[in-house]
Structures are given as C-alpha cells and as structure tokens.
Image: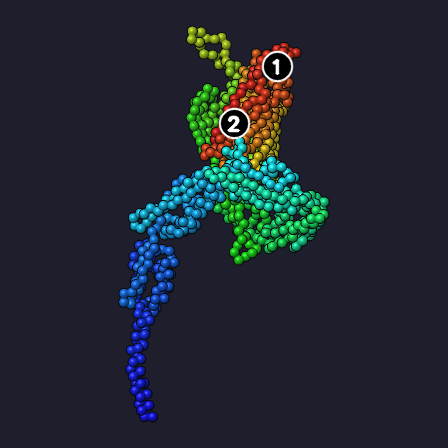
C-alpha cells in the first residue's frame, strides 16, 4: 500500500507539473491568431468614409477576434458592394482593413435610342442604383442590359440590342457608355382567327387595335406589334363575344411567330365560340346600403335579354357611382354568373361590398407652380373633409382641364396609411401656355404700313384672371383695346369683365369700301352660374361713334345710312387741282354723323365640354341678345346663337358639329342696322375656301357690305393623332356652309353695273348658302393658336349677266381663296 500511494503520489505530482505546459500548447495549436482588438484602422479609402465602414463592420474595439469572426467581418464589408477587394490583417492588437474601392460613376452616355427617351432610360438606371456619383456595380449593369432589351422586345423591336462599355477615368471614376441598336419594330403581317363561325375574320379584326399594314399605319402605328396591345385586343375579342350572348366563350390558345429576320409577326388565335345564352334571373346580394328598390334602376341586365358582359360591367359601374355618392367610393360589385348549359340560360347575381365610407383628408395640386393654389381650389367640386365622390372628383378634373392655361390633368386617390376611411386626392397638373404676346410690322395694299401688338394672359400673375391688350396702327386703321376678366369676384362664382377700346378705321374689312369710323367704348359684364354647366350674363356697354362717308370712295349704302341716322352734318371739300393747274368744278362732299349709344346685353351658355381648347367630348350652346336702351341716339337690337358639339363615332374618330346664327334689326327711327354692326362671312372662321368676309351683299363699289343675318355651320371629322400631340394640335376634314343676308327693305341694292336690284335680292334663300370641303390643321404654339386650312368651294358663283323680269343684272363671281391661315389668335 505504501508503494501504491507513493507511486500514485509521484504520478499526480508529475501531472500537476505538466498540465499547464500541455494546456498552453493546446491553446496555441487551436487559435494562434486570436487576440483582443485594441484599435481598428481602415486603409485605401477615397470617397467612402470610415464611419460608413464601421457602420457595416460587426467588430468593435475590445472584441476578441478569431478566424470565424474575421470571416464574418470580411463578408459584412464585402456585402456593402462598395469595394472590389478587401484584406483583413493584424498588426499586434490592431485590426487593419485594407480596401480597394469600386469606381464611382462620373457620367452616362446614351446613343442610338429613339423609341425610349434618354431621360426615361436614366430614370430606369437610377431606380436600380445606377446614377451619377454612385458606386458602380457591374452585376447590376448586366441586369440593366437585359431589362432594357426586354423592354424593347415588349415594344415589338426584337432586333434591338443594348451594349454597355465602361470607360476608365482618373480618380477611380468611370463613364458608362450605353450603345443601343433599336432596329425597326416588327410589323404584323397576318392575324388569323381559328374557330370562328358566327362572325367572319374581317368583322372581328375591325375591333382590334393591332392591324396589318394599311394606308393610315404610318400615322397610327397600329401595324407595329407590342405585347401590351395584343393583350388588350384579346380582351376586346372576348368582350365582343361576351356582349353578344356567348357567355362560355374561351380563348383556347395564342401563338405569336416571328420571321427569321425579326421584322414580321404572325399571330394566330384559337377560339371556342360556345353558345348564345339568355338571362334567366337577376339578383342583388351583399350589403346594399340603400334599399334595393333604389338600386334597381341602375341594374341594366333584365331577365329575357341576350346575355351581355357590357351590361354587367355597366351595372357594376353604375352601382359603384351611386354608392360613391353616399361616400362609399371603394365599393366593389362582383357580378357572378351561373350558366345552365342545357337550357342555355344564365342567372346573374351582383354581390355588393361597400367597404368603408371614405372621407377626403387633403386635396393636393402638383406640377403648376405659376398658379396660385386658391385658383385651383375654387374649381373643386370635391371638398376636403367631405366624403369621397368619384363624380365630384371627375367633375373637378374636367373643370381644371377647361382652364385655358392648363394642358392636361391627371388625378389619383391615395389612401392615408393606417386610416382605412381617409384618402388624399392628388391632382397632377400640366400647365399649358397661359396666353400670347406678339407683335410685328408689315405692309399690305389695303392697309399700308402696319404696326401691331397684342398681349393675352389667361392666368395673370397666377390669379386665374384674364388680361388682354391689343394695339394696331396702320395707315387706315388704329385700334387700342383692353379688357380684364375676374372669374371669381365673389365666392359664389360671379365673374366680371371690364373692357374699353378706342378705334379708328376707314373700312371694316380689308375688302370693304371706305367708311371712316371712330369709336370710343367702355363696358362691364357680370356672369353668374345657374347650374354646374350653365351660366347667365348681363352687361351694359357705352359707345360714342362718329361715321364719315364721302361721295368719292364710300359706297352709296354707307353714305345713305350716315345721312339718315344720328346727328348728321355735311362738309364740302374742294378737290385738288390736276397737273394742268385747272381746278375742278366739283367738290368732295363728306357726310358725318355722331351718336351715343348704351347697349344692354344678356347671355346664356350651357357648356359640358371636357376642355376649352381641343375638346373631344360634350357640347356648348350659347345665346346672346343686346338692345339699345332709352337715351341711345341710334336704336337696334341683335341676337346670336352658337352651337358646338363633339360626337364620338369610334374610339379613333370624333365628329364636331358647329352652328351659328346672328340677326340684327334696326328699331325706332333708325333706318337700318349700323354698318359696323353687320355680319360678314367667308374665310377661316365661317366658310373656308372663300376669301375672308367676301360673301353676301355687295355695295355700289362691288365691295362686301355685310348683312344683318348670318347663317353658318360646319361638320368636321377629327382625325386620330398620337395622344402626346392631341392636347396641342388637331387635324380635321371639314364641310362648311353659310352666308350673310340682308332682310332690311330700307337699303337700296345695285348690281355690278349699278342696275337696281330687287329689294329682296339678298334675303335668305337655301340656294344662296355657299359650301366647301377641305382639310385643316390647328397648333397651339408659344405665340398663340395657329390655324391652317385648304378649302375647295363646292358651289361658288361664276358670275355673269342674267336676264330677269326687271331686266338684265350683272353678278360678280365669288372670290375664292383655297389656302388660308390665322396666326396668334387669342384664346
């Protein structure tokens, strides 16, 4: 036992001496690099700050480091994607992070793109983190190449190629060069529909947006393939069948084949038409909010009808609009159909889910910095704090669009986060030209040297008020006129227009005979809305007028009117001596009349157009009447009616119908309507293709005298153009008709040979209406509205000598002017 303990004791003593040495060896063998971090240094930084690295680094001073912690730190710094090379090393107890930064992007160069704007491409690059000043990530750049190529493919450009090249610059910067080869968009060479028996291919393809090449393809670009357009046409085809009773129609398959040169597309649609179904029963279900009897008038589907998907959709929209008026703007209506294939009948149930009643928190306006906020808010029919109404939002949008200084408006309803019953209504407004400013110098045979200037601003100083100033100075005409309109002088939309003018002229139109006219006028007009779409106006206008006619260059009609109306005086002016020095025995007689008039004017308008300029929906009716009031020295009354309506024919074509009637009549002791109040016809604003203001009664000098009755109308086919141009330009085919007439018996008329004409010669007759056809273009430019037209008269008079019961009469031919234009007209 002693030996055992002795030996055991010796063994234990030896182990106690060896264990520290063994443990030290084991630790040194397992983690020779483990240390406690006393400091951290970063080397190689150029643009990235140390703080940025430390934010991503999962190591702090005092941490114990080993191989695993070093690997974690390396992965964390690499994950920032700021560096292309990273080295971690130890100097004593200091952790050294040596980095090589990725280059930063100094600039982009994009070349070869036409279909996609460079701004849009740069925006796409920015969304994935590629923009000036950012660190270059080559893997992201490769993804951009693929996505841009796919975007071109979606636009039908299958030959498109996108290549990127990175150009090294000093200071570890790069310039990215993007070279795009767009190629031509693939054209649709053939569209085949397989499985149709009820309708032929021609009838079905007529509803497609995509077409095979035709004579308008160069403008409409509808023979160019795109995936989105095809998806739209597939839905259109499905709706075409579903609207005609084919409730079990199926689009079986779609094949799109491309030619080897990637230029031609061949589309094949395989369909199963199914059978025609009738409606057996119609029900409303769900939470209706209103009594079912109040919603039934909005249900367009009736038992016994041929099934129509369009009627289901209309019912869905109408119920949504009706409940939207109660504040349930996000109402969902789901029409569910139950087909009985044996009886070929369908039961329809509309499930109504009104959701929450929604209120408007804020209404915001973006994109129109030059217009005061209150100008937009006063056009609102949707109010903050009130419940949301789609009708009111849509009406507010249209009212904004109709402002003359607004080009386009988009509206978005945005839910307020965290509050399911609140939304913000955001209007994105694109400003148009608020008006025009122009001037010029010129010369004409009729007017001599001309100086003119005009200023029109429909959003003066951001207030929405309209200011107009015109000045024209020529040898035979001087005009200075100004007007100011405030559309909201009160909160209830009463408008006020103040106007004043001074005019001197020797003739009313460039083709009229001499009649010196001096007019000073001033007036005020108030307007008031009686409904959302109708307004009335009332105004009073003062005119001080002086007319001078002479026996040398004025017409007999003008001279007769001056002699018989107003406060008339006569002046005899000796004619100048001729070259021989002999003084003529005759004198020039000048008849002058002066009078003061006060006119009371009233008007009414009904306007539902979606825009004030380049409208394509709605109508406008306007009536105006004026009469001189007691105290006026020349008495007359006038009546005017104007009509304009836009009628969509198809989704591409719209017809615009225009009508105008004007009538004036002398009253009291006044012999006839003052010459300056006569109507004129012909030219860009009435009957295009005829010389401006040349139609109607002619005076004794065979110049236009005008008439007291105007009748004119037109029908225009608005041609389709790309949407981006539609807000600023328009092309139409037109048919114009009209003329002016005289119904006043007190005026004596003569033919071209000065033979007396019957008193009713210029009275209204349908056969006397002049007509023309042609093409016109309008463009809203910085200087105003440009109008160009080429008209072909259809029934112009060729003139000649005609025998009548009262003897021969000589009639002049109509003056034709096929190409006409006006530039810079006020709007």
Name, please, the residue furthest toward the left.
92
- Residue 624 in view in this figure: no
Q: Position of residue 809 (x, y in %)?
A: 60, 12
352 vs 775: above or below:
below
Q: What SS does tag 1 mark?
A: loop
| Front in this rendered view, residue 820 or 231 | 231
Crowdedness near tag 1: few (<14), some (14–19) or many (≥20) residues, C-alpha within 10 Å: some
Q: Position of residue 605 (x, y in %)?
A: 60, 36
Q: Identify residue for label 2.
A: 789
Name, please, the residue furthest toward the bottom.
1
| Front in this rendered view, residue 594 or 814 | 814
Colour approach in the figure: rainbow
Separation of residues labelled 2 and 1 (CA atoms): 35 Å
Q: What SS does tag 2 mark?
A: strand
Q: Earlier in the sequence, mark 2 or mark 1?
A: 1
| Front in this rendered view, residue 568 or 353 | 353
Crowdedness near tag 2: few (<14), some (14–19) or many (≥20) residues, C-alpha within 10 Å: many
Q: On the rendered structure, is 153 left or right of 396? A: left
Residue drawn at 33 percent across, 46 percent down:
167
* Residue 757: numbered disc: 1
Residue drawn at 52 percent across, 41 percent down:
257
Residue drawn at 39 percent across, 44 percent down:
163
Q: Position of residue 339 (x, y in %)?
A: 68, 49
- Residue 659 in view in this figure: yes
Q: Give residue 734's quadrant in the image.
A: top right
Q: Position of residue 505 (x, y in %)?
A: 49, 23
| Front in this rendered view, residue 676 or 424 | 424
Q: On the rendered structure, is 159 left or right of 678? A: left
Q: On the rendered structure, is 285 left or right of 406? A: right
The N terminus sits in image quarter:
bottom left
């Amino acid at each position: 036992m002693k030996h055992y303990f002795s030996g055991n004791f010796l063994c234990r003593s030896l182990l106690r001496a060896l264990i520290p040495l063994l443990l030290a060896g084991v630790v040194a063998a397992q983690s020779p690099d483990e240390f406690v971090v006393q400091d951290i240094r970063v080397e190689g930084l150029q643009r990235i700050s140390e703080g940025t690295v430390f934010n991503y680094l999962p190591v702090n001073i005092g941490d114990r480091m080993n191989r695993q912690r070093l690997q974690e730190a390396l992965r964390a710094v690499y994950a920032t994607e700021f560096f292309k090379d990273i080295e971690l090393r130890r100097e004593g107890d200091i952790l050294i992070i040596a980095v090589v930064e990725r280059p930063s992007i100094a600039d982009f160069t994009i070349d070869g793109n036409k279909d996609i704007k460079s701004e849009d491409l740069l925006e796409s690059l920015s969304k994935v983190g590629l923009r000036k000043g950012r660190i270059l990530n080559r893997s992201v750049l490769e993804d951009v190449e693929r996505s841009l190529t796919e975007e071109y493919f979606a636009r039908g450009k299958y030959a498109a190629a996108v290549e990127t090249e990175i150009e090294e610059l000093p200071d570890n910067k790069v310039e990215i060069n993007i070279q795009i080869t767009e190629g031509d968009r693939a054209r649709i060479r053939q569209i085949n529909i397989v499985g149709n028996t009820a309708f032929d291919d021609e009838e079905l393809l007529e509803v497609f947006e995509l077409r095979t090449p035709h004579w308008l393809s160069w403008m409409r670009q509808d023979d160019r393939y795109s995936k989105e357009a095809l998806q739209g046409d597939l839905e259109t085809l499905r709706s075409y069948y579903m609207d005609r009773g084919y409730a079990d129609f199926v689009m079986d398959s779609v094949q799109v084949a491309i030619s080897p040169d990637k230029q031609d597309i061949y589309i094949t649609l395989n369909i199963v038409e199914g059978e025609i179904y009738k409606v057996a029963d119609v029900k409303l279900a769900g939470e209706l909010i209103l009594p079912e009897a109040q919603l039934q008038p909005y249900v367009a589907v009736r038992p016994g009808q041929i099934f129509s998907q369009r009627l289901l959709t209309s019912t869905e929209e109408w119920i949504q609009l009706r409940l939207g008026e109660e504040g349930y703007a996000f109402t969902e209506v789901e029409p569910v159909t139950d087909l009985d294939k044996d009886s070929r009948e369908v039961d329809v149930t509309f499930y109504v889910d009104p959701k929450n009643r929604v209120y408007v928190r804020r209404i915001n306006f973006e994109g129109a910095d030059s217009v005061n906020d209150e100008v937009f808010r006063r056009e609102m029919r949707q109010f903050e704090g009130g419940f949301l109404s789609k009708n009111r939002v849509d009406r507010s949008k249209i009212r904004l669009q109709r402002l003359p200084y607004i080009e386009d408006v988009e509206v978005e309803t945005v839910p307020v986060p965290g509050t399911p019953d609140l939304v913000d209504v955001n209007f994105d407004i694109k400003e148009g030209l608020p008006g025009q400013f122009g001037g010029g110098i010129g010369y004409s045979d009729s007017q001599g040297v001309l100086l003119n200037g005009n200023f029109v601003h429909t959003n003066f100083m951001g207030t929405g008020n309209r200011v107009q100033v015109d000045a024209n100075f020529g040898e035979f005409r001087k005009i200075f006129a100004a007007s100011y309109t405030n559309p909201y002088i009160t909160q209830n939309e009463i408008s006020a227009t103040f106007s004043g003018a001074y005019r001197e002229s020797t003739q009313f139109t460039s083709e009229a005979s001499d009649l010196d006219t001096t007019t000073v006028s001033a007036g005020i007009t108030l307007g008031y809305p009686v409904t959302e779409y109708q307004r009335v106006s009332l105004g009073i206008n003062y005119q001080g007028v002086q007319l001078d006619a002479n026996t040398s260059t004025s017409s007999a009609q003008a001279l007769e009117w001056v002699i018989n109306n107003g406060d008339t005086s006569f002046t005899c002016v000796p004619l100048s001596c001729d070259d021989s020095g002999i003084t003529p025995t005759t004198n020039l007689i000048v008849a002058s009349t002066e009078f003061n008039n006060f006119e009371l004017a009233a008007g009414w308008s009904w306007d539902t157009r979606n825009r004030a300029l380049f409208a394509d929906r709605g109508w406008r009716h306007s009536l105006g009447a004026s009469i001189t009031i007691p105290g006026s020295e020349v008495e007359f009354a006038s009546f005017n009616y104007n009509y304009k309506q836009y009628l969509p024919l198809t989704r591409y074509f719209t017809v615009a119908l225009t009508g105008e009637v004007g009538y004036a009549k002398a009253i009291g002791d006044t012999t006839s309507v003052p010459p300056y109040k006569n109507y004129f016809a012909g030219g860009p604003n009435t009957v295009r293709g005829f010389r401006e203001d040349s139609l109607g009664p002619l005076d004794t000098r065979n110049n236009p005298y005008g008439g007291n009755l105007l009748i004119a109308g037109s029908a225009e086919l608005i041609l389709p153009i790309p949407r981006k141009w539609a807000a600023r330009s328009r092309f139409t085919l037109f048919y114009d008709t009209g003329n002016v007439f005289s119904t006043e018996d007190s005026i004596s008329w003569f033919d071209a040979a000065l033979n007396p004409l019957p008193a009713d010669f210029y009275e209204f007759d349908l056969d006397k209406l002049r007509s023309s056809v042609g093409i016109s273009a309008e463009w809203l430019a910085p200087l105003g509205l440009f109008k160009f037209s080429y008209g072909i008269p259809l029934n112009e008079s060729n003139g000649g000598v005609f025998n009548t019961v009262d003897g021969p009469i000589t009639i002049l031919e109509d003056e034709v002017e096929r190409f006409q234009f006006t530039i810079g007209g006020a709007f």
